[in-house]
Image (tube, coloured by chain):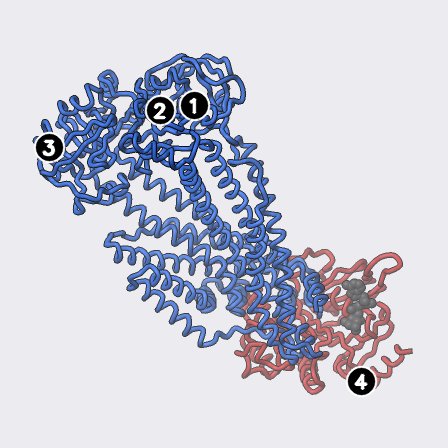
Amino acid sequence: MPSASAPPVSTAARAVDARKTYGAGEAAVHALAGVTVSFPEREFTAIMGPSGSGKSTLMQCVAGLDRLTSGSAYIGDTDISQLNKTQLTLLRRDRLGFIFQQYNLIPSLTARENILLPMTLAGTRPDPEWFDTIVRTVGMGDRLGNLPSELSGGQQQRVAVARALVPRPDIVFADEPTGALDSRTGIEILSFMRRAVDETGQTIVMVTHDPHAASYANTVLFLEDGQIVDSMEAPTADRVLDRMKRFEG
Amino acid sequence: MLRLVLSSVRHNAGRYLATLVAIVTGVGFYTAVGFISDRVIDSLEGNVDAQYGNVDVAVIPEDPTTAEGAAHDPAELRISQDSVDRLLALPGIEGGAGILTGSVAFLGDDGRAFATGATGRLWVTDPDLDPLQVDSGEAPTRSGQIAVDRGLADDEGLEVGDDVTLLTLAGKEPATIVGITSFGDSDALDDGGTVSISEADAFDWLNSGQHEYETYYLRGSGDQQDLVDEADAVVPSGFRAQTGDDFRDDQRETAGTFGNTLKKGLQAFAILALLVGGFVIYNTFSVIVAQRLRELAVLAAIGATPRQLKRSLRLEGLAIGVVGSVLGVVAGFVLTLLLDLVLRVTGNSLPGSGTTIGVANVVGGLVLGTVITVLSVMIPARRAARTEPIEAMRDAAVESNRLGRTRGLICLALVVLGLAATLVGTGIATIGLGLLAFMAGVFVGAPYIAKGGARLSRPLLERVGMEGRLAVDNSIRNPKRTATTANALLIGVFLVTLVAVAGNSMKDFAVGEVNKLQSADYLVTSTGGTIDPTFVSKLEQVPDVSRVAPFRREPVTIDGEATVVSSGDLGDLTAVANVRASAGSLDDLGPGKIAVLDTRPEAQGSAVELSTGSVQDQHVDVGSTVALEDNRGHQQDFTVVALIEPSLDSVQVGSLLDPDTFDSLFGQVAPTVAFLDVDSGAQSETKDAINDLADLRPDITVQEGNAIGQLIGTIFDFLIKAVTGLLLMSVVIALIGIINTMSLSILERRRELGLLRIIGMTDNRVRRMVTLESALIAFLGTLSGLISGLVVALALVLSINRLSEATISPSVPYLELVGILVLGVALGVLAALVPARRSTRLPVLDAIAAG
Ligand SMILES: Nc1ncnc2c1ncn2[C@@H]1O[C@H](COP(=O)(O)OP(=O)(O)OP(=O)(O)O)[C@@H](O)[C@H]1O
Ligand SMILES: [Mg+2]
């Protein structure tokens, strides 16, 4: 798998002078106003900032879901602005994992099939041991045969996390993965993501509003008006909360 | 409430598009058919007035099958000039017009005949009874003058003043065109063109010099009935007098019946198309209700009653129905104009002039379109009314993929009872109801077919990859919707299959029955002329013609029934044609002896019913005496010495007399008919050579011996093709239904598709998934239509066999059925083109964006 066999590069993904502008002229919105950032390998990075600061935009542009207006974004050494649509799709399939706030699963597929979906699409087989490990860790062992409609919101999100991790992607992008969950379930999901980083060397980039969620990360980046204004190593919920309060004023 | 409805319609305009298209197509087809048939009916009925407007007394053949225009019927009786003179001498009669027609053609400078289908007509001199108008030039009044109709003049480049050579029964006749005629709104009175011939030539050219008429029309003063009563006394045998009013009514009815049958038949197809549209409408609204569940639930939560919710949906249906129907009527009118224009450009034209917007058609189209739409919305509206406020809180529309047990039971009961009723029922009603029940069962059970069929196809489609698997899953997710979509296609395919299988079976049966009857290879008939020895020897010189059996034939009545009596060389006739005695012996013929067609019930094969049309009431047997009366009223009794076995050939012969007796009755007339025997394995050159000989003689027509068999086959083939063509209309609407369902479900599954694309399904594969699902639905619809069509056709054939003691063996056109199946799947793929493109058009991020 890519990340295990790739030579040790320090960054899993990065953006250089990334700009994203919506609209033009008077009405132009600079969602990203020149962001340069790297996401180190085997680390859990959180992105925080007020609503509308450009967090989702940054993540989406780095993950190849959207294109930058100017600047460049890299996954490993691949300049994704050079890729066409299909190449981007294949890059996502083979090298990236995604977790969203909602609507994460295909309703007609069972939990197991949902988890294996990216590999099925790629036509690759999962490492059974690795699959078992992941499924056991997310605690879905006994519900694998169920359809999403038969699972609770938290269980569905665990399936989504497992789906993002089983193919051992270079990097997992998560946009407010706990946003729709109660705090207890949220904590379960977050601790599982943390363990994936610690125990398997997974790289994760997570956008969140929740200071407590951010405290699970190695580094927190603070975004305001489309620019990175601060960062914090080894964050705690309290310190993040304090930092966030300063945006209010 | 109305505001809500209107804003909702506007908001959902895109989704209603398919509904609208379905209604507009159906209603448009319906009204266009109405407009066109009304125009045809009007013009046909108008022609009756143009042709017979001033007739007070019509002297017409008693046998209704020999009306005017059936001039080629060999059994036709004529009205002699004597009778006519007596008719004209009646008090109160002021004028008359005799009708005499015959085949004519023109001989071109290159020696080739042209306008070979034209009809020569005796020019009617009585201005009040003349059906034709002279557009330019003048009427043909003197010998050597003719007038041609406008169409013929245009087509063949004929002009007033042209000298032409006319091919007539009397041979080549030089003539000068002195006038161009037209008939009512149309060019000609006759299909192949009308050539009017002056009184001076007509009898020679059309009727071997005999002053006789096919029918005779009189005008006079006073009460029509009184005139008829007077005329009755002098009307010749085989004819009857009718008042002008009755006659016109009959003619109008004949014309109108044809038009009305045509109209009803075509409109039935239009209604069918609309019913198929009903499925599309039902589906659209079901999906819309499902998608708007949240909105409806919010309305319910803030106090809308179930009644109001239901009403809002019904009003939406009504609005769409009215708009669609109005557009449909407009489309129908435009379609009619377009058709008229296209026909005009291609040199044809619809009969009649100008399309009138018939109120009945417009109202019919509006009502039909609206009612079907409102009815189709009923069930979705009931679902909307059941919306619980709690559904506003739920994540997504709960899809019901469970099928109730009652549905299964009802389906099973309907199918079993329906088939049972069809197979053992003794009346048409039972069988019809049985078939209806069976089809209802198929419709009720369609969701099971959708579910089961999709599951069965899963292993195959899974091989394509994840997209195949998901295509199957999606179609199972809401089997009712899949089933409704497929049902729309099912109806069309069911009917096409039914018509193909039942039609082919019956065709094979009918043609087989006819072909069982032996017959001569060719029948050569001269209408008005003769088959003289020169022509016989020309025929004999054609390579591969082995024997020619000419015989004489005259129209007579036997015991009051119009028929023909013939005479010829018995040895030739029995050798070349299938003429043999079923009782008695033909060798016993002699003075005062006759052989007549066997009309005993046991001799009645289907072939005779087909070809003679009339079956005599009283049955003649060997030894009975029959009274024979000829054209001129001579009557003589004969003893029957033989009965002739009914066959294709003996029907042509009718009754047989020995040559001397024939001479004494009719004089030494030449043969007018001949049977031809050709060597087996004769090539088409033989046929061409015979036809070439006939072409130069307008009086002569050549028929192949088993022409009836071929004709029946051709008619069945035409009917099957025509019906199939008309059914295509409903297939087109079913296609719209598939496009609609797929588009709507793509909207519904927007996020899901977005997610698939994000986690690595390429756009090509997403599109393939949509295409596969569409093809699957189409396949299921086609296959169930095919199977139910087969079942019903077979049941129908069995029932017909049981009830009529016929032995129709079902003939299944396998190749066509496979073709239909392939076509069905192809339609599915075609229907997916737009939805598939749409499925990947949205940027992935918008696709997963909430809201
Ligand atoms: N498609 C779009 N068109 C126009 N403007 C957009 C579009 N998408 C985002 N924006 C704008 O870009 C800016 C950044 O949006 P983004 O979604 O990245 O914010 P965010 O930080 O993720 O906010 P939130 O915390 O509310 O999710 C916002 O001002 C937003 O209005
Ligand atoms: Mg965001």
Q: CA distance from mark 4 to mark 2?
A: 128 Å
Q: Secondary structure at mark 2?
A: loop
Dot 4 amino acid type: Thr
Q: Secondary structure at mark 4?
A: loop
Instruction: Using the rendered image, report if marks 1 and 2 lie on a common chain.
Output: yes
> Badge 2: how crowded within 10 Å, few (<14), some, or many (20+)?
few
Q: CA distance from mark 3 to mark 4?
A: 124 Å
Residue identified by numbered label 2? B89
Residue B586: assigned label: 3
The image position of residue B813, as x and y in percent, is: 35, 50
Contact (Cβ within 8 Å) of mark 1 with mark 4: no
Left or right of B247: which side holds A192?
right
Q: Nearer the viewer, mark 1 or mark 2?
A: 2
Identify the residue shown where x is 75% and y is 60%.
A67
Dot 3 amino acid type: Leu
Residue identified by numbered label 1? B124
Residue identified by numbered label 4? A236
Which hue is chain B drawn in?
A: blue
The image position of residue B667, as x and y in percent, is: 19, 20
Q: CA distance from mark 2 to mark 3?
A: 45 Å
Q: Earlier in the sequence, mark 2 or mark 3?
A: 2
Ligand 1 neighbours mark 3 (CB distance < 8 Å):
no
Q: CA distance from mark 1 to mark 2?
A: 18 Å
